[in-house]
Amino acid sequence: MDPPSDLPKMQYRFLGRSGLQVSCISLGGWLTYGSAGGGHVDNSGTFACMKAAYDAGINFFDCAEGYAGGESERVMGECIQKYGWKRNDYVISTKINWGAANGDNPVNNGGLSRKHLVEGTRASLDRLGLEYVDLLYAHRPDRNTPMEEIVRGFNFLIDQGKCFYWGTSEWNADEIERAHHVATKLNMVGPLMEQPQYNMLVRERVEKEYALLYEEYNLGLTPFSPLKAGILTGKYNDKIPEDSRFAVSDDGFVKMMRERFQTEEWQAEAKKVAALKPIAEKLGTSQARLAMAWVLKNPNVASAITGASRPEQVWDTTKCLELLPKMTPEVMKEIDDTLGNKPEPLTRRFG
């Protein structure tokens, strides 16, 4: 299936302080890819979505050892082999921390010990069918493992050519600062990027807590859930569509969100989402594209990781790039005033 002829040209951004360029929109395998392990999109659907993304100029694909018990990595690797993409033409990442499904004894198949970092990464590369990944993330902090061991483990993998850069996912600012402090003391490489949740409804960490990290380390962001599992599209305000990922996924995060449906907290968020509709209409766009463009207006965001179960969803997402020039300071202020959740400026240092 060929992409529409009217797709906007993809934009590429440098990832943090590095010379690596990633498409500002990326495709992730969370919840969807790897049907044999629990993802709800079969292999042919995964191949179609990844090809649609690649043809649209997306060069960054994200997965993790924990997605669908490792099957997400396997099917994404099979797609790369199927289409024969040149290794230097795409950027792929994976994340290490939750690998219990990939071993018989869970004791050392999780966390960020040097043992699991090395063995987990090697297992991920085997599933992907690759010699290395471009980006390797610590998929959540591990407070049971000394920071020096974590930093040394990631640097070992870089030195071994198993990855080019390492980063974090959902670490707090103090933990990221600590990693940099340890890396500097050891004359090693600190984390380049962070993968947090970031969207119109979840802003505090990215816009406030990490503020000093951009200044001190030029931290790059590759946020996930820019549409907050689809809530920001407005389609879940009244009911959950039966054929939606929200309805069929067994992922823990989605189950938690389903349990919140129609609670007071949900209704408060739904009211905010509904209030954004006139802004989207005034700009001649959908609420989904408005939410994506809003995330991409943050100058610290290198790439927003999206999900898709059909090629049409990939193409619709990329059209948010047409909206970026319309996201003026006046429009951004109107969104802030509507949401009423802009974080207060940071008033403290680390520690």
Image (tube, rainbow, N blue to C red):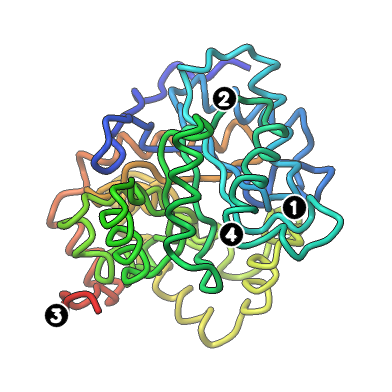
Callout 2: SS: helix
Q: Which amino acid does the dot numbered 3 rest on?
A: Thr
Residue 136 visible in the picture: yes
Name the residue carrying label 2.
52
Name the residue carrying label 3.
347
Mark 1–mark 2 distance (CA, rounded to whole Å): 21 Å
Q: Position of residue 143 (x, y in %)?
A: 51, 73
Please rate how many residues cluster around mark 2, counting C-alpha atoms within 10 Å: few if below 14, some from 14 to 19, many from 20: many
Please rate how many residues cluster around mark 3, counting C-alpha atoms within 10 Å: few if below 14, some from 14 to 19, many from 20: few
- Does residue 224 lie above or below 48 as drawn? below
Q: Which amino acid does the dot numbered 2 rest on?
A: Ala
Asked if the residue under mark 3 is in contact with the one under mark 1, i.e. CB atoms within 8 Å, the reply is no
Q: Residue at x 45, y 75 (%)?
A: 269
Q: Residue at x 59, y 64 (%)?
A: 236
Q: Is residue 192 left or right of residue 334?
A: right
Q: Nearer the viewer, mark 1 or mark 3?
A: 3
Q: Position of residue 75 (x, y in %)?
A: 73, 33
Q: Which amino acid does the dot numbered 4 rest on?
A: Ser
